[in-house]
Image (spheres, rainbow, N blue to C red):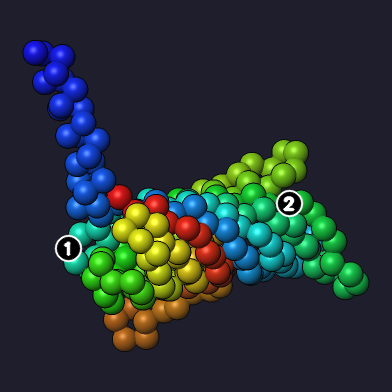
Amino acid sequence: MKTNLLLAAIVCTLVGAPSAWAQKGIEITPFIGGQTNGGLDVSTALFDRINVKNGLNYGASAGYSIGKYGAVEFMWNHNQADTLAQPRSGGADLEVFSLNTNQYIGDFVFHFKDRESRLRPFALFGAGVSNLSPDRDNVKSITRFTWAFGGGAKYNFSKHLGLRLQAKWSPAYITTTTTGYWCDPFWGGCWSQGDSHFLHEFDATAGFTLRF
């Protein structure tokens, strides 16, 4: 009797699981695409700028629906690209190292149609960190604050499978350099003026979404 009850419970759980998962609104998307990178002005004895080449990027996102139109998600994005340094003396750029970039970003996603719609355009914004790791001896990696803005569209083939197309811009704050001082002629007091430097990144990706 107990065995029969246990088997019945297992069958009911397996049969009811897909519909229960569907109500949770969980989406997992591995993706791949192309990434356009920017560069940074530097001040060294040999170089005055470093540019990061464009290249392949890939990663994954995991999200959870909030209401009919909103969602929160965590996104990881990886890119590896060579860097070129511009010599102060002029001449051709020199390849100095390969840069591994890993972004870890928490996003809020707003959909313009509800979850049951076949086509769902969306916009996203978020914040997180970027870990920049040069593939070069005696050069340490750094982790910097990053924010993200983007959008795209989801196309649902069925209740549990879809396609996600997305474009995202995510600049990483690197540092601030002092450019001089400003003094108030009326109230007195002086403040240093800074110039903030960012490593800009733009990517376009595609991936299949598993919907639960």
> Is 96 displayed left or right of 187 in the figure?
right
Report the residue at 31% width, 58% height from top. Answer: 159
Residue 129 visible in the snapshot: no
Mark 1 Cα-neighbour bin, 10 Å: few <14, some 14–19, many ≥20:
few
Looking at the image, the residue that sits furthest to the right is: 91
Q: Is residue 74 above or below residue 42?
A: above
Query: For the N terminus, which image quadrant?
Result: top left
Residue 107's disc is none
Looking at the image, the residue that sits furthest to the left is: 1
> Is 113 displayed left or right of 35 in the figure?
left
Report the residue at 88% width, 73% height from top. Answer: 90
Report the residue at 15% width, 26% height from top. Answer: 8
Residue designated by label 2:
98
Q: Percent from the top left, x then y, of residue 163? A: 45, 64
Most foreground residue, 31 or 179:
31
Q: Percent from the top left, x then y, of residue 39? A: 66, 68
Most foreground residue, 194 or 161:
161
Most foreground residue, 98 or 13:
13
Residue designated by label 1:
67
Q: Amino acid at mark 2?
A: Ser
Residues at badges 1 and 2 in contact (C-beta under 8 Å)?
A: no
